[in-house]
Amino acid sequence: MRIRLVCVGRLKDGPERALVDDYLARARRTGSSLGWREITEIEVASGGGMEREADRLLEKLGDSIVIRLDETGRASTSELLAADLARWRDDGREVAFVIGGADGTADTIAKRADRTLNFGTLTWPHMLVRVMLAEQIYRALSIEAGAPYHRE
């Protein structure tokens, strides 16, 4: 199984990039049969708009299960995310988590999404959403691999 992050915009070098890279490295060491494989960053020229972003995102999603990050989504738990990822692995599916641009995602992405997930209704900078998502995927892979989970 392949887990991907498909994001609008490029995360520059700095503390956020270092944290994402750290969680990626940790995820690869969990021993989970689920696998984090890549981050795809979509760049759209200034003035391209959400529809152009959506076109570029759709090109990268293929037949993946699409989990869109948006404040209108539903909350989850780390345990439920781990169970969902394991189920999708067993179904032989790839999962793509989508983080839109500054204005979110176009309706075409919302319609394409199999699920919309939120990290609360607060507004988060996109660079921090990547960090939080990377950490949650690492946590889910750890749970799935049987590592002790301190919340149980």
Image (tube, helix red, strand yellow):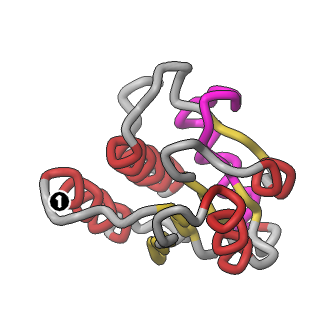
Numbered-mark total: 1
Query: Residue visible at 57% across and 68% down?
Result: 3
Is residue 5 placed above or below 81 in the rendered structure? below
Is residue 114 placed above or below 103 in the rendered structure? below
Query: Residue visible at 48% across and 72% down?
Result: 45
As drawn, the residue found furthest toward the front would be 47
| Circle 1: element type | helix
Figure quadrant of residue 81: top right
Q: Give neighbour class at mark 1: few <14, some 14-19, many 20+ (Cα, 10 Å).
A: few
Front one among 60 and 74:
60
Q: Quadrant of the N terminus?
A: bottom right
Figure quadrant of residue 74: top right
Figure quadrant of residue 54: bottom right
Query: Residue visible at 71% across and 41% down?
Result: 116
As drawn, the residue found furthest toward the top would be 121
Type of residue at label 1? Ala
Is residue 80 found left or right of 111 in the rendered image? left
Is residue 62 placed above or below 22 in the rendered structure? below
Q: Position of residue 87 (x, y in %)?
A: 75, 57
As drawn, the residue found furthest toward the right would be 111
Q: Position of residue 70 (x, y in %)?
A: 62, 37
As drawn, the residue found furthest toward the left would be 14
Is residue 68 found left or right of 47 in the rendered image? right
Q: Position of residue 144 (x, y in %)?
A: 54, 53
Instruction: Tell me the residue that label 1 is attached to.
Output: 18
Is residue 52 placed above or below 111 in the rendered structure? below
In the rendered image, residue 72 lying in the magenta stretch gets the answer yes
Query: Residue visible at 66% across and 68% down?
Result: 52
In the rendered image, residue 39 lying in the magenta stretch gets the answer no
Q: Which residues are magenta?
A: 67-89
